[in-house]
Image (tube, rainbow, N blue to C red):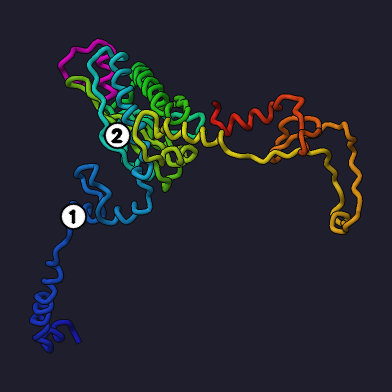
Amino acid sequence: MSADAIEAVDPNKQEWQTEAGAEGEPQAAERILNQDEIDSLLGFGLGDDADSGRTGVRAIINSALVSYERLPMLEIVFDRLVRLMTTSLRNFTSDNVEVSLDQITSIRFGDYLNSIPLPAIIAVFRAEQLDNFGLATVDSGLIYSVVDVLLGGRRGGAATRVEGRPYTTIERMLVTRMIEVVLQDARQAFAPLTEVEFKLDRIETNPRFAAIARPPNAAIIVKLRIDMEDRGGKLELLLPYATLEPIRKMLLQQFMGEKFGRDNIWEGHLASELWATKLEVRAVLDEHKEPLHKVLNLKVGDTLMLDAGPESPVTLKCGLVDLSSGRVGRMGHSLAVRVEKPITPAAQQVMMKLGGGS
């Protein structure tokens, strides 16, 4: 049977196809999310950085991250860093420099590398005492501003940008000098808390070559804004949580201030109470090592032979520490020990530690 015959036999075919198409129109006309709505759902909105990551799927993913607010001392350290950088960069550039702290937050290391706006200069530095690394990222606006200021650019005008080309050796060297100044200030900012020396390891322009941690690892990111009149840009410092782990207990302190939680009144009271502590001092005439089976078989009337005579010196001990030595005698109706040697150096060190060095 031919196709013409089929159409002749089934005259309702065209009508059926039309009805099917009409029924399918509502499905085809279902609303499709645009890109902005998809980004908002996933938490990748283009709005304020402070609000990004707090909504959508990204908020669920980031819920496992440790918040920097659990390390309150970090805010004090970086507030101190801002003050130090303001003074140091003014001396470095001979210009009116203002440094401000924009944000301190947590981020996954892989997400941070993907979010770095290029072109940029990424400095990898090493925290010597913490035995780990960190990153300092300088955006293009700050790079050209620093180069313009250091090379005698006019004040009151925006720095000239030449996009689409790699940074020259001179530009890299000038930015490197600025980063070294920042790292020196970072050392001073951490000094009241702990001694940490930050040394510049290398300069990179490709984020892939600045991988100092695994992508899922959490890190602290500090966003700084540096303004030089009408010029300026952003500087970001990133410290993985693995870098801060050795000093985590110090960063958990709740006290605010330059001395990072030290209370002189409490320290003095604690030291005075330690000096007034009563200790047990034993006068040991001799000590023996015996097998366990012999000790367990001791009975009333057994005699233990000591390698000491009536004139042998006795050792004065406090716990396991030998304090001094002396002679056994009698004073009135009581036995007594006359100290014949000064306190040993080992005992002095123990007492100095107990007394807080006073």
Relative to 12, 304 lies left or right: right
Amino acid residing under circle 2: Lys
Residue sitting farthest toward the front: 332
Residue 102: x percent and y percent?
25, 34
Above or below 100: residue 307: below
Give the alpha-carbon distance from disc 2 to disc 1, as whole Å.
27 Å
Any part of residue 161 in sight: no
Residue 175: x percent and y percent?
34, 21
Write the start and end of the magenta stretch as one range: 142-160
Q: Which badge, 2 or 1, is on the more N-terminal residue?
A: 1
Task: Select label 2 or label 1 by which is in front.
Answer: 2
State yes or no: residue 148 in magenta.
yes
> Which of 193/309 is in front?
309
Location of the C terminus (image quadrant): top right
Amino acid residing under circle 1: Glu
Please tell me how crowded label 2 is: few (under 14), some (14-19), or many (20+) other residues with Cα within 10 Å: some
Q: What residue sits 18% from the left and 14% below the top?
A: 155
Q: What residue sits 12% from the left and 89% below the top?
A: 9
Above or below 65: residue 279: above
Report which residue position mark 2 lands on: 223
Among the 4 quarters of the image, the one containing residue 263: top left
Relative to 156, 80 lies left or right: right
Q: How many marks?
A: 2
Please tell me whether mark 2 sits on a helix, a strand or a loop.
strand
> Which of 130/353 is in front?
353
Q: Which mark is residue 37?
A: 1
Residues at badges 2 and 1 in contact (C-beta under 8 Å)? no
Among the 4 quarters of the image, the one containing residue 139: top left
Location of the N terminus (image quadrant): bottom left
